Image (tube, helix red, strand yellow):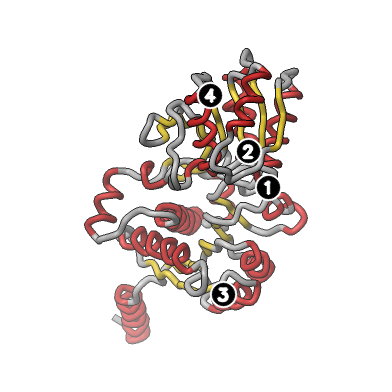
Amino acid sequence: MPRRIRLLLTGLLSISAVAAVTPARADIIGLAAPLSGSSSLLGQQLRTGAEAAAKTITDRPITLDVQDDLCTAEGGTAAAQRFVEAKADIVIGFLCTDAINAAMPILSQAGIPVLTPGVRTNSLTDTREKTGWPIYRIAPRDNAEEQALATLLLPLWREALFAIVDDGTIYGRNLAESFRAAAEATGLKPVFVDTYRPQLENQVGLIGRLKRAGATHVFVGGDREDVAIMGRDASQIDYDLILAGGEALRAATVNTTPAVGTLMIAPPDWSTEATTETLLQLRSAGIEPDGYVMPGYAATEIAAKAIADANAKGEPTRSILDAETFSTAIGTIRFNEKGDLAANPYRLYRFDGSQFVGLNP
């Protein structure tokens, strides 16, 4: 064999040998979370879920680059700059609006998509066409609760004599007004509307006014304790009244338990949505699926799948996030054209005397 050909073959074999022993570049998932300060407990939950999910991915190497965003604009900027330097494929996290708003221009310019399981601010995705930010939201939008009230509660109360009351707070009033507007848009009108004084030992006066108005159902823009007191006071005068409220009813009982039959519109408690396999994995590692643990877990699953599919198809990761449906430990997730959840996660629940039980899938 001529010497030149032997040298060429030797060189090719050497290149093949080097390629065979050189490890593949790890997929880099950035994780931004408040790991210090008043929100550190939530940030640590997010981190715990993400790290647990990363351990289940064994078909390719994954590096989780964790940064403390401090829940501030300065922290968000610093975290984003770190992710750009590290050449992150995708970033998950951010629980605070200031941090993500500061980070997005930097990450967007670098072409790095972001999956947030925590920031609900409507404008984050409403301005996507203008900003071009590659943002995807696992958390519900701020107005998802209002939309769910109209779609889940109004059909049940179409023939009911219903009232609407609120506690005068921004949250309570906005929720009540949105429900009232949605009802009136479909030709329904409440028999009674009022603002009550919250955090009283009793709501006897309000209950009396509701009864005189003939209301059989009432939507309450307020917190769990007030709704529970209303239910107790109605029961004491044998007034059969169905109460309903928003996500605030999921808070822990302070002194009074909600009345049996009280309705709540809220997103799922993700710890009850997790697959049995995932719960076993977490608990065997001493992890309880509280708070942001499961959203962090699901975000990591989506990120890893999006990177893998982008590499396999030779497409940008953003294109995969735009087009695909992702199977996660908390269910199937798909994003719409804004980057929001394609399906509103809010559901209807009924209190059975000890807990709120889902009434619809």
Dot label at residue 331 = none
Mark 1 / mark 3, whichever is N-terminal: 3
Residue tagged by mark 1? 169
- In this view, 115 is above or below 260: below
**Labelled pair 2, 1 in contact (Cβ < 8 Å):** yes
Depth check: give the residue in front, 255 or 50.
255
Q: Would residue 300 appear left or right of 190 to someone viewing this image? A: left
Circle 3 sits on which residue? 79
Q: Can you say whether 352 is above or below 47 in the image?
A: above
Inter-mark Cα distance, 2 to 4: 14 Å
Q: What amino acid is labelled 3 in the image?
A: Ala
Looking at the image, do the residues carrying marks 4 and 1 touch, with CB atoms under 8 Å apart?
no
Residue at 26 percent across and 54 percent down: it is 281
Label 3 residue SS? helix
The span from disc 1 to disc 3 (Cα, nearest Å) is 35 Å
Name the side, left or right, on which 242 lies relative to 275: right
> Label 3 to label 4, Cα distance in Å?
48 Å
N-terminal-most mark, 2 or 4: 2
**Counting residues from the N terminus, which is met first, the one under dot 3 or under dot 4?**
3
Task: Give, as a three-letter code, the residue at label 2.
Answer: Gly
Of pointers 3 and 2, the one earlier in the residue sequence: 3
Estimate the spatial distance between the alpha carbons at disc 4 and disc 1, rounded to whole Å: 22 Å
Q: Name the residue under label 2.
A: 221
Q: Does the residue at mark 3 contact the one at mark 4 (Cβ under 8 Å)?
A: no
Secondary structure beneath label 1: loop
Q: Position of residue 38 (x, y in %)?
A: 52, 69
Count residues near mark 2 (Cα–Cα under 10 Å), then give few for <14, some for 14-19, many for 20+. many
Estimate how packed mark 4 is, as few (under 14), some (14 to 19) or many (20 or more) residues with alpha carbons within 10 Å: some
User: On the image, numbered disc 4 is attached to which residue?
Assistant: 242
